[in-house]
Image: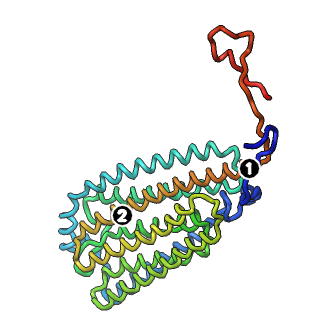
Amino acid sequence: LPQTGGPFRCRAGYDRSRVMSGMSNGTLVHQAMPKGKDALRWALITGATVMIMIFMIVLCFGSIRGCHKVQSCVVAFEAESVKTQLNGYAIVGLSTAFVLELVSLHFSYESARPVLGLVNGLDNTFMPPVLLCVTLFVLILENLIFFFSSTPWFANASAAGLPVYTAIYVEWLINVPILLVLAGCCALNRSTDEVARPLLVTNIYIVFAWSAHFISDSSLRWSLVFATFFMYFCASKDMISWAQAYKNDTDPDVSGTHLRQASTLGLVAFFGLYGLVYLSRLNNVINDYEERVWYLCMNITTKLIMLMLFGGIRSSRYHDLIVNMLVNTHFSFRRQVAVMDPEHAGNGDEDLYKQLIES
């Protein structure tokens, strides 16, 4: 223990400047969050890919038909429309998580607002919960569509005349980029340029996966599916490199590194599971309803796991902040002792017996 009146000394390895300078291996950093122009560019590229694929399909195979225009698709939808209980349960559970995260964000921001300008990078801690709230809200909207729709206006008919739930793919095109920004920029402190390539590749292969349903030629369809999975592996390689680069750049004293890496590696694993379900449906191993249930379960699980991971990341971030502030601040411990005040001795009131005085 330190001597009375002596300064508190910390072990080597902590640097006072790490807290206040916002270094990449410190506790709070200035994350390179995407700007509005970045999000707009990504949206335009994704939209252009959608338009090009629709044009090519229409040019080569005819128009993409709405599900309500194809009798076999309507029959398949009506057979599944009574099985929407899971979507109702999902709405209740997701709404609860959304409200809890929103309330937590509100109170966290209100409590931290007086010191936002004092602690470098503190404002960055509020971006992940904002993005998580957006992903939950979009997923709630998707389930509301399934639960309340009596007609398949949100689906298209595949080349085989079966439902292709376009609403699911639209949700992916919105939420998957947000999840990649959370994992890359918020958790692993990667730059916007590093995140951009796997993000765009992922959105493009989602569009390819959707488009493959409308191609009647088997060889062309499976060529597009092969291209889809090749792009998945390329994007996954980039994402794994994020985790490795973060591990190499991060001070070993920083806590929660395993949670940050898990946010990216977990997405790689889950995206692979989505691909297995997709292949199972193309090969008629599962039917349309089973495919939809699998996607629903994985959509919810992915978001809830990200919620839990970022809860742990926030806790470890605040822990590191407190530790760094303590070990990099010079202060002295002063011994304090409890003595009995003679004026109150013997009256039975222990609260009045003892007073703290400085030694």
* Amino acid identity at mark 1: Leu
Percent x, y of residue 268: 45, 72
- The residue that label 2 is drawn on is 298
Q: Earlier in the sequence, mark 1 or mark 2?
A: 1
Residue 291 appears in the figure: yes
Pick the residue in front: 214 or 192: 192
In this rendering, is residue 326 above or below 243?
above
Colour theme: rainbow
Kindly identify the residue that appears in the image at 63 percent across and 42 percent down: 111
Instruction: Name the image quarter holding the C terminus.
Output: top right
In this rendering, is residue 56 above or below 32?
below
The dot on residue 118 is 1
Figure quadrant of residue 304: bottom left
Give the structural element (helix, strand or loop) at label 1. Answer: loop
Query: For mark 1, does the 10 Å Cα neighbourhood hold few (<14), some (14 to 19), or many (20 or more) residues?
Result: few
* Amino acid identity at mark 2: Met
Q: Residue furthest bottom?
A: 219
Instruction: Name the image quarter holding the N terminus.
Output: top right
